[in-house]
Image (tube, rainbow, N blue to C red):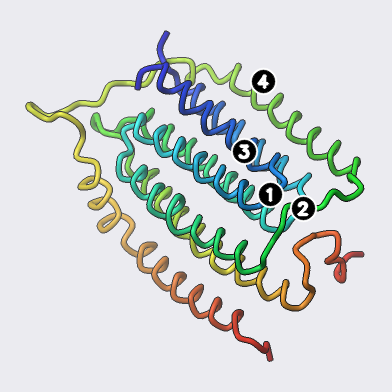
């Protein structure tokens, strides 16, 4: 049997579902952040799979790979800023548990 | 990529992805995340995206992971103490993830184009594999030059933001 595009898309979707479930059921803010990274990576996987599937002049569609490059860059910047926010939050509240941080809760 | 390798690395990525969510210890979670990203990089190699695979290893498995582990160390986080489990959150998270997978299954079943195998890449005579870094670089610097410059500004803004956020007193 050969690999098809759907194999990769399904793995990508499963990875996204794992990240989504993790964001919803974990209460530790750092783990939630890691699950966000998982979801970004799931999107990257489907982009690269589509890039390989839709050949342009016999080569992969490199526009998609450049987009993945940008996503990785933005994700790295996001991690830096997010972790700085978490550290500032920890200094103010001494906790990383999201249920203890409820000042903005309606 | 042979199907066996694909299934191996896909299983590696997914199992360690689940381990990230399931572990109570944040350090173990972060290390599972590294393995998950490495499996994903192997999948990228299987899709002939060598440059993206290398970037994935360098940026995610390298820089981002060090940052995560550093923050976990800095905050001195222990394994989570067992609190009263929030059953509604567990049920909600599980249900939404399951619904997502079910919907994905339905959509992919009907996506007939996705059932055909990947087309073969045209290689020039004597070429072993595609000239990946060269092609990505050409596309990046010619077609997408302006977004590339904007990304540079974004990183500068992020750097300044992190410095401001990390100051002892926020005014």
Mark 2 or 4: in front is 2
Distance Cα–Cα, label 1 vs label 3: 22 Å
First in sequence: mark 1 vs mark 2: 1
- To which residue does mark 3 refer? A16
* SS for callout 1: loop
Q: Chain of mark 2?
A: B
Q: List x then y, in percent, for residue B160.
A: 50, 80
Q: Chain of mark 3?
A: A
Observer-nearest of A9 and B9 = B9
Query: Do badges 1 and 4 share one subunit?
Result: yes
Q: Are marks 2 and 4 in contact (CB under 8 Å)?
A: no
Distance Cα–Cα, label 2 vs label 3: 24 Å
Mark 1 or 4: in front is 1
Q: Residues within 10 Å of mark 1 (few under 14, many from 20)?
A: some
Q: Quadrant of residue A12?
A: top right
Q: Quarter holding the N terminus of chain A?
A: top left
- To which residue does mark 1 refer? B25
Relative to B42, say whether A38 is above or below: below
Q: Residues within 10 Å of mark 4 (few under 14, many from 20)?
A: few
- To which residue does mark 4 refer? B106
Q: Residues within 10 Å of mark 2 (few under 14, many from 20)?
A: few
Distance Cα–Cα, label 1 vs label 2: 6 Å
């Amino acid at each position: 049997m050969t690999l098809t595009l759907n194999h990769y898309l399904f793995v990508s979707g499963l990875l996204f579902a794992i990240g989504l479930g993790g964001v919803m059921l974990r209460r530790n803010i750092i783990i939630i952040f890691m699950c966000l990274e998982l979801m970004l990576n799931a999107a990257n996987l489907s982009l690269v799979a589509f890039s390989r599937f839709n050949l342009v002049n016999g080569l992969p569609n490199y526009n998609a790979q450049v987009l993945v490059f940008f996503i990785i860059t933005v994700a790295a910047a996001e991690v830096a800023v997010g972790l700085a926010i978490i550290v500032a939050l920890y200094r103010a509240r001494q906790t990383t548990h999201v249920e203890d941080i409820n000042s903005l809760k309606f | 990529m042979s199907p066996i390798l694909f299934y191996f690395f896909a299983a590696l990525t997914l199992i360690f992805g689940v381990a990230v969510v399931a572990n109570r210890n944040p350090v173990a979670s972060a290390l599972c995340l590294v393995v998950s990203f490495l499996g994903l990089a192997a999948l990228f190699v299987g899709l002939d995206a060598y440059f993206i695979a290398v970037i994935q290893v360098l940026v995610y498995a390298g820089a981002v992971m060090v940052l995560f582990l550093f923050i976990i160390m800095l905050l001195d986080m222990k394994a989570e103490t067992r609190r009263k489990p929030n059953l509604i959150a567990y049920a909600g998270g599980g249900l939404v993830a399951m619904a997502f997978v079910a919907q994905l299954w339905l959509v992919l079943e009907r996506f007939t184009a996705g059932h055909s195998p990947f087309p073969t890449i045209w290689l020039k005579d004597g070429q072993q594999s595609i000239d990946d870094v060269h092609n990505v670089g050409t596309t990046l610097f010619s077609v997408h030059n302006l977004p590339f410059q904007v990304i540079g500004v974004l990183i500068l803004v992020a750097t300044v933001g992190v410095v401001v956020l990390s100051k002892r007193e926020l005014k």
